[in-house]
Image (spheres, coloured by chain):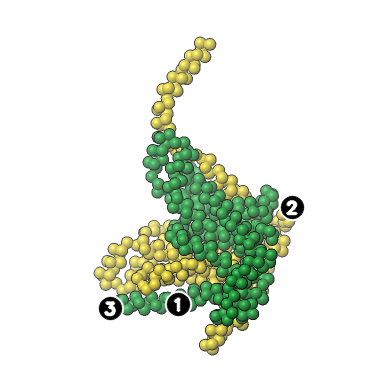
Amino acid sequence: MTPKRTRVWIVGVVAIVVSFVVFLVPFAFVLLQAAKTPAEASNLAFSWPTDWQFFPNLLETLKSNDGVLWRAILNSSILTIVSVALMVVVSAMAGYVLARKKSKWGPLVNFFVLAGLIVPPAVVPTIWVLKGLKLFGTMPGMILIEATFGLSFCILLFRAFVGNIPRELDEAAVLDGAGPVRLFLRVVLPLLRPVVVTVIVVQSVFVFNDFAGPLYFLPGNHNVTVQLALYTFSGQNLSFYNLLFMAIFLITIPPLLAYIFFNRQIVAGMTSGAVKG
Amino acid sequence: MSTANAATARRAADIVAQEPAARKRRPIKSFYPTWFFLPAIVLYVVFFVIPSFSSFYFSLTRWSLFDAQFIGFENFVQFFRDPQLYTSFIHTLIYAALTSGSKVILGFFLALLLTSPILGRGYLRAVIFFPVLLSTIGVGIMFKSLLDPFHGMVNAVLGFFGLPQPGWFTDPNLALYTIAGVDIWKGVGIATLIFMAGIVAIPNEYFEAARIDGASSWKTIRLITIPLSKGATATVIILSLIGGLRSFDIIWATTGGGPGFTSDVLASVIYKQYQAGFYGLSTAGNVVLFLLVTVIMVPLSYFLNRKPVEL
């Protein structure tokens, strides 16, 4: 082996060992805890379960607290799907026109889009607005809030992408007799597919993982989302660490699947416009 | 009758004459209808602009959501007089600076490592990035167990080697820094990813020229990689600072601002005051956070973006 190859090899091995300790051990800890009996799990030790209880724990977790986790999964799914769908439609329309039309309002619009990324939302006044609209603590209200908070990020992505689509395409469609709506739906939107996928994946992960949003705007047992359910669970079940860690494992599955299947889109979305805490 | 006819005829003639020309001249611009903005504007104004602007007024009131009594700057005075509240301001600054700085430095060196040919590169990229996608609450609970002062695995290992076993989340002097560490663990992947994109975009000719000139690898990093990934650095600094200043989830999931108020930041104070029913005070905290973010971010992003990015 040449010295360079040796170095490549040594650095790689060191990095892999460090990554095992820093990243894989915590993940393994969650899995092992989730498979233990309550007594064993409460030791918090990094040990092999003597009595492998993975599937009983799984069922127990889903059943606990009157199946609150099921309700949470259902609520989070509805919230994620509808708010992301709304976000995509609304921001694709806005980003498209923003990229095509040069108007004197441009700088102002840019200012507001960037403000949406930087400015922390004013929570209590938002609750006040929601109450005024009779939407506080309701799923539709939460959906609209999530859609609004994701808007800036999506508009930036769409605007950048539309900028790369040649205008000649629009002109050809218009000469062929397409109206504005048809031009958007039939010509532009199909070309936006890659960025639509990116937006859907990235925002789904964000909305699904959002904790502060539902904490403020969606109180009530009936509306509980998975993050809130997990948080409440961690406060109550200190004698059932195994179930708590099973719950952590369960809510890690959707992001994990997203990462496995849409790795490329997630990386693209995070590096292109990636502006979100 | 005849005049009407003439007029109609003229109009018809006008239309006939103008139609093709008008069609040709009709600017393509009008095919980008302004009403496409409408849904976005409605959402944005109702749920973001109105709350943001009204927060300035409500921060000056004693507020019950139903009626607001104007009390001037009393909330702000209370905020900066009450040590439980203003320490959160200091903690926010420490927390943001610490997490942002660490993410920039760690992210840069991890990106250097992961763009060089090393063993297991794909695996390393995946494992460093994955925590970004995890639930913050889940990560918080996980680290609370791992760093438990009595049973936690980390202290067990430290004890084995005869090292001190600190109360990571329970020691008032340590809690904030422990949380920052967890935040870095979870968020360094995104910084790494952005730096990797920046480094990969540097034309290879620069590195070849440096190699031919016999530059050492540290010199190549210092004189080529760092200056040419300035754009990525700016993005990482801005992103991680915004995230750090607004941080709430991870703090709420681990210490809830405790022990005492030693790990309270602005965002957690806003929530606590809201929970306690002090809506005006909570909104004042929100305005303080808003001003802090603006005062830091506006000059900073101006400064970082001013120099042309050579990418």
**What's the CA distance linking mark 2 and mark 1?**
57 Å
Residue that badge 1 annotates: A18
- How far across and down, in percent of the image, does residue B169 sit? 60, 76
Name the quadrant containing residue A64. Answer: bottom right
* Amino acid type at mark 3: Thr
| Distance between mark 3 and mark 1 Cα atoms | 25 Å
Is residue A27 placed above or below B276 in the rendered structure? below
Q: In the rendered structure, find residue A2 and report the number of the disc placed on it.
A: 3
Q: Position of residue A138 (x, y in %)?
A: 66, 53
Can the viewer see residue A260 in this picture? Answer: yes
Which residue position holds label 2?
A: B67
Q: Give me the chain that's yellow.
A: B
The local crowd at label 3, few if under 14, some if 14 to 19, many if 20 or more residues have their Cα within 10 Å, is few
Name the residue located 61 percent from the left edge and 61 percent from the top edge.
Answer: A73
Rendered colour, chain A: green
**Chain of the residue under label 2:** B
Q: Residue at x 41, y 61 (%)?
A: B231
The quadrant of the picture occupied by the C terminus of chain B is bottom left
- What type is the residue that disc 1 sits on? Val
Q: Is residue B250 left or right of residue A172?
A: right
Q: Amino acid at mark 2?
A: Asp
> Residue placed at 45% from the left, 75% from the top?
A19
Residue B18 picture location, percent across and down: 42, 25
